[in-house]
Image (cartoon, helix red, strand yellow):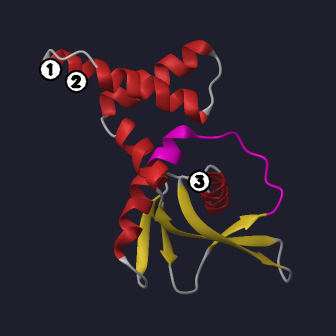
Amino acid sequence: MRLSINRVGSFLNNIRGTVLKRDMDLVRDLLFADRGIDQGLGGDVEIEAGGHEPQVVAEHLRLLIEARLIEGDTVPDDQYAFDHIMPIRLTWSGHDFLESVRDPEIWKKTKEGALSAKGFTLDLLQDLAKGFLKKQIEDRTGIAL
């Protein structure tokens, strides 16, 4: 399923009050997609939603805004039971998080580590990914970080 976000006026819809479990694979995918919106205003941005409902994608975009990984607008709509979510750009923190989990092998190890701990926060997830990344750099360069 591909979702199109028109940065000028058509926003992803989000049902208010949706309860969901954070999907960190979707978070990572959305950050990769949002990285492409830093190109300026206008046009559509295609997001590979991996079979997720638009409301789930929109709620994850809202979480990314709350976590300050992306800048975006949330526009309430009193006519419908929807809020509109419009991502604008990745923040510095968003770029940092994305770089720490960019490598698929590091991402896999990071998720496995978080699952084995049976809980995590975004900060701990990023710290774990950075630990794997540091180890990879040390192994390749011989320089301890």
Q: Is residue 116 above or below residue 98?
A: above
Residue drawn 28% across and 20% down? 145
Which amino acid type is marked by label 3? Arg
Report whether residue 12 is seen. Answer: yes
Q: Which quarter of the picture shows residue 98?
A: top left
Q: How many residues crowd mark 2 within 10 Å: few (<14), some (14–19), many (20+)?
A: some
Q: Secondary structure at mark 2?
A: helix
Name the residue rendered at 32%, 26% in the picture: 133
Residue behind mark 1? 140
Question: Label 2 is placed on what type of residue?
Answer: Ile
In which quarter of the view is residue 58 placed?
A: bottom right
Label 1 to label 3: alpha-carbon separation:
32 Å
Q: Is residue 33 magenta?
A: no
Query: In the image, is residue 128 above or below residue 52?
Result: above
Kindly state the secondary structure of the residue where label 1 is placed.
Answer: helix
* Secondary structure found at label 3: loop
Q: Left or right: where does residue 113 sit relative to residue 14?
A: left
Question: What's drawn in magenta, residue-wise?
Answer: 16-28
Residue 68: assigned label: 3
In the depicted structure, whether residue 12 falls above or below residue 78? above
Type of the residue with mark 1: Arg
Residue 18 pos. (x, y %)? 79, 54
Which label was assigned to residue 137? 2
Q: How many C-alpha atoms fall within 10 Å of the one at disc 1: few (<14), some, or many (≥20)?
A: few
Q: Camera-side residue: 142 or 21?
A: 142
Instruction: Give the mark, 1 or 3, whose residue is nearer the N terminus.
Output: 3
Using residue 47 as the reference point, say whether residue 116 is left or right of it.
Answer: right
